[in-house]
Image (spheres, helix red, strand yellow):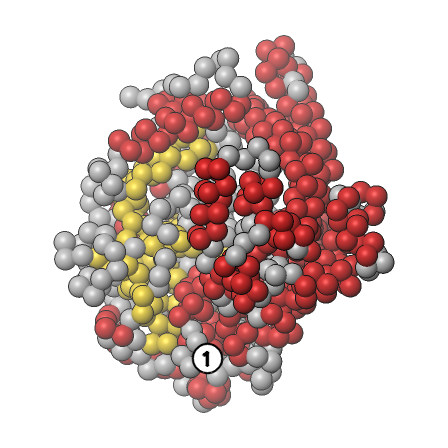
Amino acid sequence: MKKVSVFFALIFAMMGIVRADEGMWLPMFVERLNYVDMQKMGLQLTPEELYSINNSSLKDAIVGLSNGPKPRGFFCTGEIVSGNSLLFTNHHCGYSSIAALSTVEHDYLNEGFAARNFSEELRAEGVSASFLVRMEDVTAEILSVVTDDMDWTARNKAINAKAKELEEAASEDGKLNPVVKGFFEGNEYYMFVYKTYTDVRLVFTAAQSIGKFGGDTDNWMWPRHTGDFSVFRVYADENGEPAEFSEDNKPLNPKHHLPISISGVKQDDFTMIWGFPGSTERYMTSYGINYNVDSFYPVVYEVFKAETDVMDEYMKVDKAVNIAYADNKAGLANTWKNFEGQMTMLRKNKVAERKAELERQFSEWVNANEDRKAEYGDVLETLEVMFAQLGETAGRLYYPNFLGQLNPLSTASLLMGYVNVMTNKESTKEEKQAAAESLKDIDVDEEFKDLDARVEKDMFVAVMNIYGNKFATEELPESMKKLLKKHKGDWTALANYIFDKSMFSTPESFKTMLEKPKAKKVAKDPAFVMIQALMEQIYSVVPVYRMANTAIAEADHKFVKGLREFYAETQPNKVLYPDANSTMRMSYGSVKDYQPADAISYDYVCTANGILEKYIPGDFEFDAPDDLLNLIKARDFGQYADENGELITCFLSTNDITGGNSGSPVINGKGELLGLAFDGNWEAMSGDVNFEPKLQRTINVDIRYVLFIIDKVYGASNIIEELDIR
Ligand code: ARG
């Protein structure tokens, strides 16, 4: 039917010779690529039971969670665990919703929440849950619009237009949400058709001292004692179709839900994980890695860390600040710690060096043949040169960018368009009117929602100093130089001055200004002057940045194309899998311990005893609820104890996952739920670029710990009764 690509030729050649652990596989190819191998490892389900587009199958219990109604990407994964569409995901996946629903009076974040019946369930606004109806190969259709004379930008434009056309044709008048995605750097295309439900409700969460036990200290680490789960439910209209939130909606009757096993796990047990991994860079070159490690990650790390340090100070002592900043802080901290881990482990695991060796072999193969030389001869050099360019612009792009996102600069930036039009002599009357009109769209209260002036000011001073340290005064835009000179080159003094004097710092002064806006006056506001200067600096590097990124995308496309030919010829037994891109994947492996370093051996399970060991009363990260502690001390684990009477909190498996997989079900050979994936381990933080079989592990919360918390700690027997426990 469709053009047989190199990929397909490879698939057929390779059946049954795949190695487990590494790889995030597309559901529609599991039968051909992985099934035999999975069976050997302990899978008992048929291919039809895993992925079928006609009958209900395991994939129908897997849900992608998005912000907003369009499933372009998924921030997490969930799984359906009851006939009433009860949905399990991670606590950190529900975190935004839980924080948004929390107030000082109803502090679900710090105390937990358990709905005793449907009517008590709380609307998780903005969250949608998408089911994959089917996926299909649209490579031929998409690439049919590409012609030889197109440059990279024209090519993408044509591809996007075609993708949109295919998506619209498959949408059944908006009932379905089809999404076309590129694979192997634009060498293949697949369409994923989703049904998206927008009425999702919170059913249960433990206190964050359970759900986030260990905080950012334990994040990305093993051993682990985090009860990282929360419970939601998907609602539909009376016909089971997606509908806006309404009191009349009913719990969705799902096509499939996962039964639960409380038999526990043993070393080497088969595990598969289904979900929506967001992004990996397994085909990244050494140049890309070096750029990230040397130029990009350090900036993000430095700024985000400074910001969360400030937030922490206030969050520790002020409950309102704690709730208001919780979500923002969790995201920033998760990112800077991830980047710290990547910087350390990409170096330690010598990933760039190993990629450079692959690039050397690739070049040798290219240079051995004139046709290949013509097609791929300049690819690596392009990448080297372009990443060097990006590296040079990174500081001037990212430092001003991050500084400009802080108040009062970000609020001042809302007036930039307006001031431009009003102070430009060539603006027409209509343009001025439209600009004045646009100010009415500014929702000042929304801009300041959940912000604490003390936190905002301290963050601004901190990041201003980081920024100031990066640039020699001569490099700065003129208007900024002037501002700085007035404060004798003292960045702290300048930051204080801007924050204290700007009309954009408080909702009151901002509102007063909006009542009678005067462009000339706004133009002189110190925050406005500063944000304009920062934009000037950013714009000075944007052309290079754009040019380099386009060149890199095109070169990556060619490199991966060449690399696939290279492997097909030199290592025909190797099966390549596409990078994660927020589409449904299956990864399979087994339960396994690991040795992080010489003389150190990590067990594959953690027990609740570790909670008592780590417990620090009143601590920001290591406090724990008395109810939990008492049950552990009394060893009252009920049916959730293992055969030694221990309560397992988390376990390790070799599955290949990444961010976006959070909340994904870990499933045994019978299709039963064993736990929820929620993290990766520190020693393999380089894993998104290169999978490390000896070191890389997925950290899962054991389903028995999940049920123990729901049942024994919170007494939410209504939830337990709904489940299909085996
Ligand atoms: N590291 C986890 C992930 O990215 C997120 C954990 C969130 N917890 C936290 N303490 N910030 O999948």
Q: Quadrant of residue 137?
A: top left
The residue shown at (43%, 76%) is: 103
Badge 1: few (under 14), some or many (20 or more) residues near its Cα, within 10 Å?
A: some
Number of numbered labels in the structure image:
1
Residue 441 in view here: yes
Residue that label 1 marks: 104
The image position of residue 273, as x and y in percent, is: 41, 53
The residue shown at (60%, 80%) is: 317
The residue shown at (42%, 26%) is: 159
Whether 302 is drawn above or below 216: the answer is: above
Assess mark 1: CB under 8 A from ligand 1? Answer: no
Whether 66 is drawn above or below 396: the answer is: below
Front residue of this view, candidates 552 and 283 = 552
The image position of residue 497, as x and y in percent, is: 73, 63
Whether 320 is drawn above or below 423: the answer is: below
The image position of residue 672, as x and y in percent, is: 32, 59
The image position of residue 38, as x and y in percent, is: 39, 46
Q: Quadrant of residue 476?
A: top right
Whether 410 is drawn above or below 24: the answer is: below
The amino acid on which the numbered mark 1 sits, given as a three-letter code, is: Val
The residue shown at (55%, 74%) is: 321
- Residue that lies at the very extreme toward the top in this rendered image: 370
Q: Secondary structure at mark 1?
A: loop
Q: Tell me if 608 is positioned left or right of 533 in this view.
A: left
